[in-house]
Image (cartoon, grey):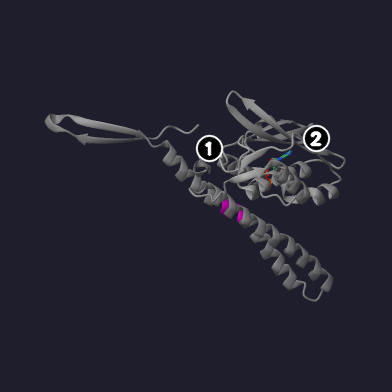
Amino acid sequence: SPARQLLVRVRPLERGAVLVVSEDHSAVVRADESKRDLVANVSHELKTPVGALQVLAETVQEAADDPEAVRRFAARMAIESQRLGELVRQIIELSRLQSDDPLLEAEVVEVDDIVSEAASRTRDAARSHQVEFGVAGQTGLQVVGDEGQLTNALTNLIQNAVAYSDPGARVSVTTSRVAESDDHWVEIAVTDNGIGIRPEDQERIFERFYRVDYARSRENGGTGLGLSIVKHIVAGHGGTISVWSRLGRGSTFTIRLPENIDADETGLPWDVESIG
Ligand code: ADP
């Protein structure tokens, strides 16, 4: 972990005495470092698709008298520019979620709606990867928050479960209620029996741009930002995300969100202003 940064102010007092005030400056320094790292990471990540597009554009020009080659390179340019567009979209999304004002809505959200919307968005991908998909667990659960963002977060987890599984695999979404003394939580778990994640990678996959297998992520159109975005959405809702995984066996990603225990929609159970 990074060294503690103490900001020390020394103020001379009367008769040679000094007043020493020290405050912990670590958080501020960390935030600056994180911004600097983001710029460095982003520049690095943008270079790949931009470089590929440049090379492809030059190749197309050189192949002008071979229509078949032109078509082939143009098709690859389309894929690269789509990738670049998705990367830029996710970078903007992540920086908004990391900002002081992530613009999250706070309304009562039916968990069943999030699950069915995320399931329908990922149905085609599951079908084309020949992955069987199922939903189970408790119905009628509610949380408070931004329905669109929560749907995006769950969609992302299902997309990963499908992408990092082999044909014939099974992905399931399970919803449940967890009560811990006075705290009531809703858990949404996405389980796959796919490739799994080693313990040392489990610790890092929520970092932006971290990918265990760069080639496989790229093949799936991955940017390495998905889980980082999910983590920020969940945190913005006062929740947590955790992963359980065994290499070669599969993974479970579990989102835990505060449950809306007040069925009366006029009285939200906590100060919604403080969310996000
Ligand atoms: P990506 O765009 O690469 O999928 P993510 O941030 O969504 O980026 O995930 C980071 C990395 O975590 C992935 O590249 C992959 O190596 C690993 N990962 C994520 N979900 C799973 C999963 N369900 N099974 C195995 N590995 C996963």
Q: Pointer 1: residues within 10 angstroms few (<14), some, or many (20+)?
A: few
Can residue 146 be seen in the rendering of this structure? yes
Q: Say which residue appears at 64% left-offset and 61% top-offset.
A: 50
Question: Horizontally, is 56 left or right of 126 in the view?
Answer: left
The correct choice, above or below, for 205 with respect to 87 in the image is above
Toward the viewer: 147 or 221?
Answer: 147
Taking the magenta stretch, the answer to whether it contains residue 151 is: no
Toward the viewer: 129 or 79?
Answer: 129
Residue 146 on image: x %, y %: 61, 47
| Residue 73 sits in quarter | bottom right
Q: Say which residue appears at 66% left-offset and 60% top-offset.
A: 85
Which label is found at residue 213?
A: none
Is disc 1 placed on a helix, strand or loop? loop
Residue 140 on image: x %, y %: 71, 38
Toward the viewer: 134 or 76?
Answer: 134
Residue 218 on image: x %, y %: 72, 50
| Part of the protein shown in magenta | 42-46
Q: Say which residue appears at 68% left-offset and 47% top-offset.
A: 151
Q: Amino acid at mark 1?
A: Trp
| Residue 212 sits in quarter | top right
Q: Say which residue appears at 39% left-offset and 37% top-offset.
A: 25
Question: Horizontally, is 236 left or right of 52 in the view?
Answer: left
Q: Pointer 2: residues within 10 angstroms few (<14), some, or many (20+)?
A: many
- Which one is closest to the eye, mark 2 or mark 1? 1
Question: Horizontally, is 249 left or right of 226 in the view?
Answer: right
| Residue 164 sits in quarter | top right
Residue furthest top as drawn: 181
Q: Which residue is mark 1?
A: 270
Q: Which residue is mark 2?
A: 193
Toward the viewer: 115 or 132?
Answer: 115
Marks 2 and 1, the one that precedes in the sequence? 2
Image quadrant of ligand 1 equals top right
